[in-house]
Amino acid sequence: MWLHYLFQSFGDVAELSILDFGAASGHKAMLFSVLGAHVIAIDIASEAIKRMQNARRDSRIKFDIVQGDISALEAFKGESFDRILCSEVIEHIPENTLPRFCNSIERVLKPGSKMFLITPNYEVYGPAECSPEYYRGFNYQVQL
């Protein structure tokens, strides 16, 4: 269901630069690429990188894959992306690192661009992971 909101929010992505931060399997990065976007997929997990590399090879869908964390985000030039997707990632970022993460996201977004951030929905999925970071509260505000 949330994919509907994602595509509605991002609109026509042809020729846009998209960052999928925390890309996991890369399936959303692949969808955007098929729709004509220039996509970079970042994930910290070696297993996710292998899955994306295999999917890219098998499908022949073109997108870039980067293994990394916030440091990889900081390596991009300012105003590099038209759209950023951050799906079920922010709950894994340590609270003391949130300002760094938010500042990095703001820095790499082009003026007038969009970020789509989603977290797990407890009411839909319940305690699927039984992991406290999925359910902790945050009290952080971004000044734009």
Image (cartoon, grey):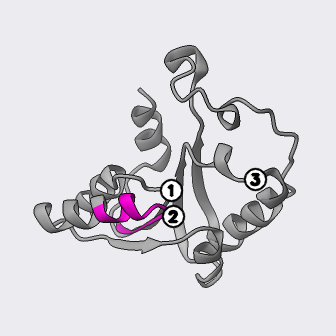
Compare marks 2 and 1 and give the one earlier in the sequence: 1
At 78% from the left and 56% from the top, the residue drawn is: 98
Coordinates of residue 140 in the picture (x, y in percent): 86, 46
Any magenta on residue 41? yes
58 relative position to 26: left or right: left
| Numbered label attached to residue 44 | 2
Residue indicated by mark 3? 94
* Place of residue 69 in the rendered image (x, y in percent of width and height, measured from the top left): 59, 68
Q: First in sequence, mark 2 or 3: give its number.
A: 2
Q: Quadrant of the C terminus?
A: bottom right
Task: Residue 17 in the image: state x and y as whole percent.
Answer: 44, 70
- Rendered residue at 34%/55% (across/down): 26
Q: Contact, CB < 8 Å: mark 2 with mark 1?
A: yes
Image mark for residue 22: 1
Which type of secondary structure does the marked residue at label 1 adopt? loop
Residue sitting at 11 percent across and 62 percent down?
58
Height in image: 138 above or below 33?
above
- What amino acid type is highlighted by mark number 3? Pro
Does 74 appear above or below 20?
below
Mark 3 element type: loop
Q: Position of residue 110 (x, y in %)?
A: 61, 71
The crowding category of the residue bearing disc 3, from other C-alpha atoms within 10 Å (few below 14, some 14 to 19, many at least 20), is few
Tag 1: amino acid: Gly
Q: Which residues fall within the magenta stretch?
A: 38-50
**Which marked residue is nearer to the observer: mark 2 or mark 1?**
2
Per the model, the C-alpha gap separating discs 1 and 3 is: 15 Å
Vertical relation: 19 (above or below) 77: above
